[in-house]
Image (cartoon, rainbow, N blue to C red):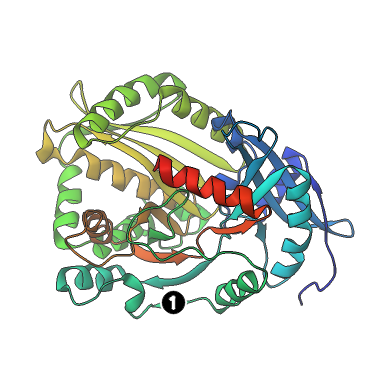
Amino acid sequence: MTHHKTLRIQEISTEQHHEFIAEQARASFLQNPIWPRTKPSWRSQSLGWFDNDELVAASLVLYRPIPVPGLRGRSLAYIADGPLFDPDLVELDAVLEPLVPHARSQGAFMIRMGLPLDLRRWDADDVRKALSGGEHGMIPELQPVESNTTAWKMEDTLVRKGWQKPELSEDFVAGQAQFQARIPLPQLTAEQRGDRESPEFEQAVEEVLMRMDSTSRRQTRKSTRSELSITSGGLDDVAAWQTLYEETAERDNFTGRPQSYFESMMHALNESETSQCKVLFAHYEDQLLASAIYVQQQDTGWYVYGASTRAESKRYAPRALQLEQIKLSLEAGAAWYDLGGVSATLNKEHELAGLTRFKTTMGADVVQTMGEWDLPINKVLARAFTMYLERRG
């Protein structure tokens, strides 16, 4: 039964926010109330929606100031993977109604919101075959294995309310990618996932391996016989990660993040009772070959960042760390292991096609989320902000 009544919106405490997240089956770490510690230049609020005294929805909102003279105090209100609520109990209309005046009262000229629902999902094999076949332009042309009617209805609501739908693009745009690569994980009982040596745990790992294509599976199996030492580090070990990450950034020609970002990320997420963040290493003897940053919260484990050296490549150290993150996700009882964003393109010549190929050969299905929608509160400032982003990009 859905609420047709007006909900009251107000700031909630970090404790209230954590308690609400703990009750949700899925909640991205980008909605964790401690996440803003990684964004020191942004202001944040934990917001709660109340039906009388009952907390029925919650969201982390980040306010990003616009770096334009004369507009002090005005900001973009950014909601990544939120608000969190049960669409069977709460109507989207009731969530949006008090959100807009609240954001306006906080000096927001625009709201950018990525509701945490999936529209549809495509099988890894189908996407991989279509990519090599070259007969399709974009992933939505394929037949999905799953489609979410609730999410499609929410799209209609957002359009009716004047929100701007994200454009289907071959390239990555600012914010969270609309298409995500996720490996569905077998579900184990608490007892089974507590013992990696148990037949059930080993069978679950085998099921994930069987989703991979033959090359990925062979390389992953080989990594387990490559005399690699797999370890998990703490805050003191971030410096070792950073050195390898900077080497990777230089080799692959991307701009990396500073060490302080990863330190604050680990510190914040490990202080939260709903999440964990690990820095993982694969060594051969004394040489660090690969490293990864892994995050887990509620039903998902995320491979967030990776770094590797070209040395000893036949030991497949990055594969060993992927397998370790799959095992950590199984231990946590997660339903998904998330490999991050992919492009919607099926053009195998596109520069992002290789990423989709790699992730689907790992056995990851492609999920189309609702994407990030914009609501201009002040149309002139919203247009100026969009132009600023385009110039900067």
Out of 180 and 346, give the one closest to the viewer: 346
| x 58%, y 29%: residue | 41
Instruction: Inspect the image, locate mark 1, and give the three-letter code of the amino acid beneath it.
Output: Glu
Based on the displayed image, in which of its 4 quarters is residue 89 positioned?
bottom right
Element at badge 1?
strand
Q: Residue 286 at what x, y percent from top left? A: 20, 20
How many numbered discs sit on the rendered protein?
Answer: 1
Left or right of residue 91, residue 142 in this image: left
Is 26 in front, or is 46? 46
User: Could you tell me which residue is drawn at 60 percent across and 47 percent down?
Assistant: 31
Q: Residue at x 53, y 66 (%)?
A: 165
Residue marked by disc 1: 146
Q: Does the rendering let one see residue 90?
A: no
Left or right side of 312 for 261 = right
Horizontal and vertical percent position of residue 34: 62, 36
Given residues 262 and 161, the one toward you in this image is: 161
Q: Quadrant of the N terminus?
A: bottom right
Give 311 or 82, whichever is nearer the viewer. 82
In the image: residue 93, left or right of residue 224: right
x and y percent of residue 389 in the render? 47, 44
Give the residue furthest to the right.
52
Residue plotted at (24% across, 41% down):
318
Can residue 278 be seen by looking at this rendering? yes
Question: Is the C terminus in the top left, top right, bottom left or bottom right quadrant?
Answer: top left
Q: Is residue 121 above or below residue 316?
A: below
Give the crowd class for mark 1: few <14, some 14-19, many >=20 residues within 10 Å. few
